[in-house]
Amino acid sequence: MSILGIATPTLTSSTSTTASDTASLSSNYEMFMTLLVTQMQNQDPLNPTDTATFTSQLVQYSAVEQQIKSNAYLADLKALATTQNASNLVSYVGKTVEAEGKTVTFDGTEAAAWNFDSSAKSSAATITITNSDGKTVYTTTKALATGSNTFNWDGTTTAGGTAPAGDYTIKVAGTDASGNAVTITTALTGVVSAIDFSGTTPLLTIDGQTISAWKVTTVSGGS
């Protein structure tokens, strides 16, 4: 199934922000009430404050009180939405997903795999793989078909050795029959083994690689 652009408030950030806002409003409300009582106690008996002014102030204080309650309700709704989205994401564990991304983790044994779409055919596109330091470790050419393409890398370097385990990034560049550069959209595919909710964005672990849950584009039923 296709995963559209989903956004969700994080439980930690939304709750703490709402709590801070509510505390601020509560403080203001208490201050307003103190000022109102003080004003009533110290007004000039010969020139009392206009009742319309008192009414206007009471309306303003009432509005602040309602805003405090609204913030509390919004906090509950945000927490509920976050919990529901978290429950949905948990179902990704054990599923094969495809996500936007150019970097994958090579474990030193199993081949690293990238999926990418090409806007047009390219008879000899250049594929470059770089390590986490940005250094090129492998370069080759590959004919691309229009649409979906796959590239597997077993860790062999251009020099003939074997690259160590680590994160590697792919770059694909090619031209069509007219010599115009084709557009390449790169993705990574793998089985979700864990989900981390501790940060501001849920993170999926896919074959050792951590990516944002919001980068997932497709989810398939099995591993």
Image (cartoon, rainbow, N blue to C red):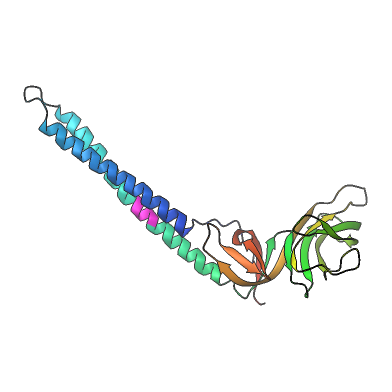
Question: Residue at the top extreme?
Answer: 46
Say if the magenta span includes residue 112. no
The span picked out in magenta is 71-75
Q: Does residue 155 appear anywhere in the picture? A: yes
Residue drawn at x 26%, y 42% is: 29
Q: Position of residue 100 (x, y in %)?
A: 69, 59
Q: Is residue 47 above or below residue 41?
A: above
Residue drawn at x 77%, y 65% is: 114
Q: Position of residue 167 (x, y in %)?
A: 73, 63
Question: Residue at the left extreme?
Answer: 46
Quadrant of the snapshot with the C terminus: bottom right
Identify the image quadrant of residue 52: top left
Q: Position of residue 106 (x, y in %)?
A: 75, 68
In the picture provided, is 73 more to the left or to the right than 177?
Answer: left
Q: Is residue 21 above or below residue 36?
A: below
In the picture provided, is 139 more to the left or to the right than 50?
Answer: right
In the picture provided, is 112 more to the left or to the right than 73?
Answer: right
Residue drawn at x 41%, y 56% is: 15
Quadrant of the snapshot with the N terminus: bottom right
Q: Is residue 5 above or below residue 97?
A: above
Which residue occupies the foreground of this view, 106 or 123? 106
